[in-house]
Image: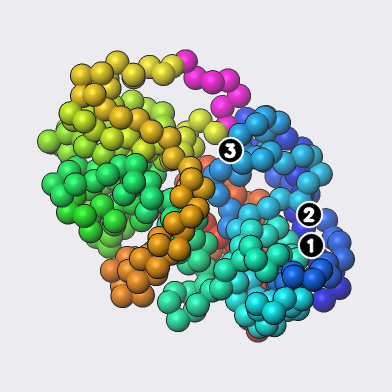
Amino acid sequence: MTTNREWVLAERPAGEPDLDCFDLQETEVPDPNPGELLVRTRFLSVDPYMRGRMRDAESYAEPWDVGDVLRGGIVGEVVESASDAYDAGDLVTGEGTWGDYAALDADEVTPVDPAVADPKAYLGVLGMPGRTAYFGLLEVGEPKPGDTVVVSGAAGAVGSVVGQIAKRNGCRVVGFAGSDEKTSWLTDDLGFDAAINYKTTDDYRGALESAAPDGVDVYFDNVGGPITDAVFTRLNLDARVAVCGQIAHYNDEEVPTGPRKLPQIIAPRARVQGLLVSDFASRFGEASERLGKWVASGELEHRETVVEGLENAPDAFLGLFAGDNIGKQVVRVSSPAE
């Protein structure tokens, strides 16, 4: 336990990132300062928002400088504790690095209970994506029984939870996803009423007319682009649109002309609201408690796509933009027996 591998940002991407943007370096394993924990990473989260941190521009997430160690959510095992709050062997989750080990402030991590769910679920349904779905749908989307809820990126970490919570609230749920395997998972396993494979559908508006014949009351947008354009034409009176992500545009070098479809929200008096889960930080405990109960009881299903090995973390990240993942994309960095 003397060498620590860490990924750093080697260069800023122009358009879609590639492997040249990443460099794996070896450093010494850090010593925890008082109040810190030395954590060995078990699972590392890769998320679409990280693409924005690669830009030299201000955003809601602080940009990385070239040469910075990349950061993200982790689940890991405490191997050395300089805090009374945790002991060696405890499992915790928090923001770490794309590395084998990280020194984390004990006040900025939370415990992981394997009795509730597999530890990697704490990076998905029981982590930031699950909380985003919970608050984004219930607080921004405000679904009511009988509403039709449409979710783009529905087979991802956030969208798959959004759809299931909407069903719990008595809604008709329609999801957009990028393969027949994904759409089958949505309808057969998660209980979506309909799912549209956007890669094999040329007419998004026509597909929506069939899947959501009574129009759209709530749209949870993870994608943007032509899917969102089509949904805007189907919004009902007083519809609510929660804008969570725009992955269709994250690699654009120029901002697309628009907004093109704003006239479509005038007649229905629709409300379009951006969503940052950090706005609900004071209520994270509420979300974690409810999501944990639903997962433990089997009422809320989840799935993780696991890429093996820290050395493959960049491939896992790039795979997000190719739609490789079903559910949450994570990297297994180590196993308990190692």
Mark carried by residue 77: none
Instruction: Compute the Cα span from label 3 to label 2.
Output: 26 Å
Name above or below for residue 38 compared with residue 193: below
Q: Is residue 22 left or right of residue 129?
A: right
Does the magenta stretch mainly form a helix, a strand or a loop? loop
Q: Quadrant of residue 214?
A: top left
Q: Residue, x 76% and y 76% (percent of image)?
A: 82
Circle 2 residue: 24
Mark carried by residue 5: 1
- At label 2, which amino acid type do we have? Leu
Do the residues bearing badges 3 and 2 touch, measured as CB atoms within 8 Å? no
Q: Residue, x 49% and y 37% (percent of image)?
A: 247
Q: Residues within 10 Å of mark 3 (few under 14, many from 20)?
A: few
- At label 3, which amino acid type do we have? Tyr
- Provide the residue span drawn in magenta: 251-257
Nearer the observer: mark 3 or 1; the answer is 3
- At label 1, which amino acid type do we have? Arg
Q: Is residue 113 left or right of residue 232?
A: right
Residue 105 screen position, x and y as percent: 70, 65
Callout 1 secondary element: strand
Mark carried by residue 60: 3
Do the residues bearing badges 2 and 1 touch, measured as CB atoms within 8 Å? yes
Instruction: Compute the Cα span from label 3 to label 1.
Output: 28 Å
Residue 295 screen position, x and y as percent: 36, 70
Q: Residues within 10 Å of mark 2 (few under 14, many from 20)?
A: some
N-terminal of the pair, mark 3 or mark 2, is 2
Is 35 in front, or is 292?
35
* Residue 145 can be seen in this image: yes
Residue 246 screen position, x and y as percent: 47, 35
Q: Is residue 55 left or right of residue 155?
A: right
